[in-house]
Amino acid sequence: MAVIFLVRHAQASFGTDDYDRLSDLGRQQSRWLGEYFAERGTRFTRVMAGTLRRQQQTAQELLGVLGVDPAGILTHGGLDEYHGGALYAAYTGGADPVAQQKSDYRGYWQTFRAAMRAWSEDRLPQMPETWGEFGARVHGALSAAAEGLGRDDVALVVSSGGAIGRLLGELTGASAAASIEFNLQYRNTGFCELIASPGQLRLASFNNIPHLERSDRRGSITFA
């Protein structure tokens, strides 16, 4: 069966005015993941990423280690993250998320979890897409990534924590609350292995970070 490695982007610039770019650590995390695949002789039949810079940069850094031309990355907007700024504003009535991230980090995540729950329960009509629409577009993107893969093919797909969490909830039949927890616990450059067969995707492993599980890299495990 074909295999899809579904990767969350590397550490972005959380707490800054421009979150959508990798930090220096994020670029290194991406290269370490590339080294992991290189050591195992993994060759990707297809590489796909969302349109966001942090997703594209993760794929580019990883492929650079493998000596693969990043021009071959397929781009699919269905892999993009939900709009976190809009979510926070809809739930709080317009509060500044970056200000709370800087002043009350723990409180920010408590608020964000509550906002996600409200969105999943269709209590935030101001959002640019519903929870159901979000799930449908992510599933559509993964279906596109899997389309036409042969038995021995391997695909790399780079997305974001919320999109991956939403997809995993659907694949496993889990609740919306579980999908939210999948999102919030998903580590930067962590990957899932999906087994792809015609018309079906199955989860084989979840949130793996073998490239960071070393004594000298423990401090490089991040979630944002």
Image: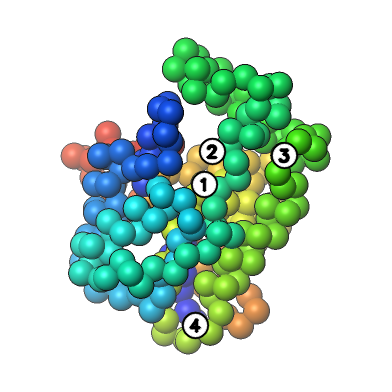
Under mark 4, the amino acid is Leu
Tally the marks.
4
Q: Nearer the viewer, mark 3 or mark 1?
A: 3
Q: Considering the image in quadrants, where does the C terminus appear? A: top left
Residue at 65% x, 27% y: name it: 89
Q: Nearer the viewer, mark 2 or mark 3?
A: 3
Q: Is residue 65 left or right of residue 194?
A: left
Q: Secondary structure at mark 2?
A: helix
Q: CA distance from mark 3 to mark 1?
A: 18 Å
Q: Which residue is mark 1?
A: 161
Residue 209 location in percent, x, y? 35, 51
Q: Which residue is mark 3?
A: 127
Dot placed on the residue nearer the N-terminal end, 2 or 4:
4
Dot placed on the residue nearer the N-terminal end, 3 or 4:
3
The circle drawn on residue 184 is: 2
The circle drawn on residue 149 is: 4
The answer to whether 197 is drawn above or below residue 14 in the figure is below
Q: Nearer the viewer, mark 2 or mark 4?
A: 4
Q: CA distance from mark 2 to mark 3?
A: 19 Å
Residue at 27% x, 70% y: name it: 69
Q: CA distance from mark 1 to mark 2?
A: 7 Å
Q: Kindly tell me whether residue 143 is visible in this rendering.
A: yes
- Residue 23 sits in quarter: top left
The reply to whether the C-beta atoms of the residues labelled 1 and 2 are less than 8 Å apart is yes
